[in-house]
Structures are given as C-alpha cells and as structure tokens.
C-alpha cells in the first residue's frame, strides 16, 4: 500500500476526486498492490510518521494471519491525524470510524475516504477529547488506535482529556483494546503515560528480541516487524521506560507502538 496526495482543486473542478494521484509522495506503507490517496489538506497534519508506522504494522500482521484480523474488527481512530492508519485498515477490511476535533480535518478525511472508494467501510466524524458529549460511547469498538503526542504538543488537548476519552471508549466490561503510537518530542507529553497508569490502563510495547522498540518508516518494508512482539511494561515506571527507550536500527523515526489494555485483562500477544 502506498499513499499519495490528491489535490483539492481537482475535486472542486470535477465535482469529485481525481481517479489518479497527483503530487505523489515517495512513501510506501506496505507491499500490497494498492494505493491510498490523501487529500492535500492533510499534508500538513502532524503525525504522519506515527500513521505510517502503524499502517505498516497492520499490513504486516494481516500478512501473518494475525488472530485479530483487521477484517473482523470495528475500529475507532481517536484523533485521525492524516488518516493513514485508518484508511489502511479500511483497505484491509475493517469497519473504521476516523475522528478529529477540527471540522476542517474531518471534511478532508471525508474527501480522502471518497477518493479511496471506502465510503462503505470508513467514516469520519467530529470528536473532541475535551467534550464528553461528542464521545461515541454508545458504539462498541473492538480496537482503538491513537497517536496523541502531536495534539498534546500543540496544546490543543490535555493529557487528562485524551486519557479520559480513551478510557470512556474502553469502559470496563468491554473487550476493547487500543494501539497507541508515540514519537517523543516534548518532556511534558510524558505525563500522559502517568495518567494512563492512574486510569488503570496497562501498556505493552512492541519490541524485537533485544528489547528495542520496533517501527517502520516510509521507505522500509513492513517485514521490518518480523520477530517483534509486545512486552509488558511496569505500570509504576511508564515514564522512565518511554523516555529511555532503545530503538532497533531500522526504527529511524524513533516511534514506539504500545498495546493498551485494562489491567486485569492483559494477555501477551504472540510473536
């Protein structure tokens, strides 16, 4: 799967998305013979590195016949950023809801969904972490994916608001779990991990056999994830573990991928 940007002007001029990508980006998020079109308004949205890493992980796990097949999943993207991971999951067969607090981003996500022919598979709607009235708690999601660091860095939402939104959609009694992608930029972002622990959420980090965080960049194949697995983390020391993470040589963007679960419901995800 590769992703490209489609222009807003072509949409306005023709009444719909162009059938071919324009301004192609030299990026790859998998080896499948598919293409993801991103609306040009999303090019400046932060979180592309995290979105690519997570998208490639899903492609790899699908190739490995993961027991949690994307095909069987109902997914909420909590803060969709550029929408790369959500659109990829839609391509793989998941039923995906992409959410974002900014209406302009939601509109651009709608256009990207249409451009990719995923209107029956992926939706987009407004969800503000700071406003519980916008939460979709009446829906039962199997999986939540999020890359909150960039929003926190921009001071658009507090760590507690993000964790509140995440926890609300992972209410006790549900089987919902989450994948959180994080790229460290500011020290204050790390408080989020303390808040996660205080909310009764546990973390496992995706690592290689040497205990180093694994992720793929735009130029790398999804096979970078080969041999990786989720390793439980000590909930009394999340911040230090994240701050002092070691990274696999291939993890050039220094992204960390975490499996988030309610404590007491943890199970180790296989290799």
Image (cartoon, rainbow, N blue to C red):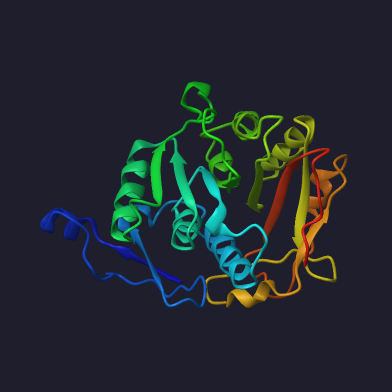
Q: Residue furthest left?
A: 13
Q: Position of residue 263 (x, y in %)?
A: 81, 38
Q: Residue at x 66, y 41 (%)?
A: 189
Q: Position of residue 69 (x, y in %)?
A: 60, 60
Residue 18 vs residue 122: left or right?
left
Q: Residue furthest top?
A: 133
Asked whether residue 185 appears in the rendered view, the answer is: no
Report the number of numbered marks. 0
Q: Residue at x 58, y 48 (%)?
A: 145
Q: Quadrant of the C terminus?
A: bottom right
Q: Position of residue 43 (x, y in %)?
A: 38, 57
Pick whichever, 24 or 3, lies toward us.
3
Residue 257 vs residue 121: left or right?
right
Q: Residue at x 53, y 63 (%)?
A: 52
Which quadrant of the structure image shows residue 160? top right
Which quadrant of the structure image shows residue 152? top right
Which quadrant of the structure image shows residue 202? top right
Asked whether residue 100 appears in the rendered view, the answer is: yes
Pick whichever, 1 or 257, lies toward us.
1
Residue 221 vs residue 4: left or right?
right
Q: Residue at x 79, y 69 (%)?
A: 208
Q: Is residue 154 above or below residue 68?
A: above
Q: Position of residue 66 (x, y in %)?
A: 66, 64
């Amino acid at each position: 799967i590769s992703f490209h940007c489609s222009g807003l002007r072509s949409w306005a001029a023709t009444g719909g998305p162009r059938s071919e990508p324009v301004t192609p980006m030299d990026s790859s998020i998998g080896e499948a013979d598919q293409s993801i079109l991103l609306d040009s308004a999303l090019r400046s949205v932060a979180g592309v590195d995290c979105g690519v890493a997570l998208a490639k992980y899903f492609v790899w796990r699908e190739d490995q016949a993961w027991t949690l097949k994307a095909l069987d999943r109902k997914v909420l993207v909590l803060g969709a950023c550029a929408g790369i991971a959500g659109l990829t999951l839609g391509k793989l067969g998941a039923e995906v809801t992409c959410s974002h607090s900014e209406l302009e981003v939601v509109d651009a996500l709608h256009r990207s969904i249409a451009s990719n022919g995923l209107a029956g598979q992926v939706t987009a709607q407004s969800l503000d972490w700071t406003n519980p009235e916008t939460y979709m708690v009446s829906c039962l999601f199997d999986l939540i994916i999020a890359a909150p660091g960039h929003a926190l860095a921009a001071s658009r939402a507090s760590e507690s608001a993000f964790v509140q939104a995440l926890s609300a959609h992972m209410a006790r009694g549900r089987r919902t779990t989450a994948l959180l992608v994080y790229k460290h930029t500011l020290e204050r972002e790390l408080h989020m991990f303390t808040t996660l622990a205080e909310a009764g959420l546990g973390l496992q980090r995706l690592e290689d056999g040497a205990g180093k965080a694994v992720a793929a960049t735009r130029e790398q194949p999804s096979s970078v994830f080969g041999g990786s697995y989720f390793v439980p983390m000590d909930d009394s020391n999340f911040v230090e573990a994240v701050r002092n993470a070691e990274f696999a040589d291939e993890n050039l963007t220094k992204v960390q991928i975490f499996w988030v679960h309610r404590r007491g419901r943890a199970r180790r995800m296989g290799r």
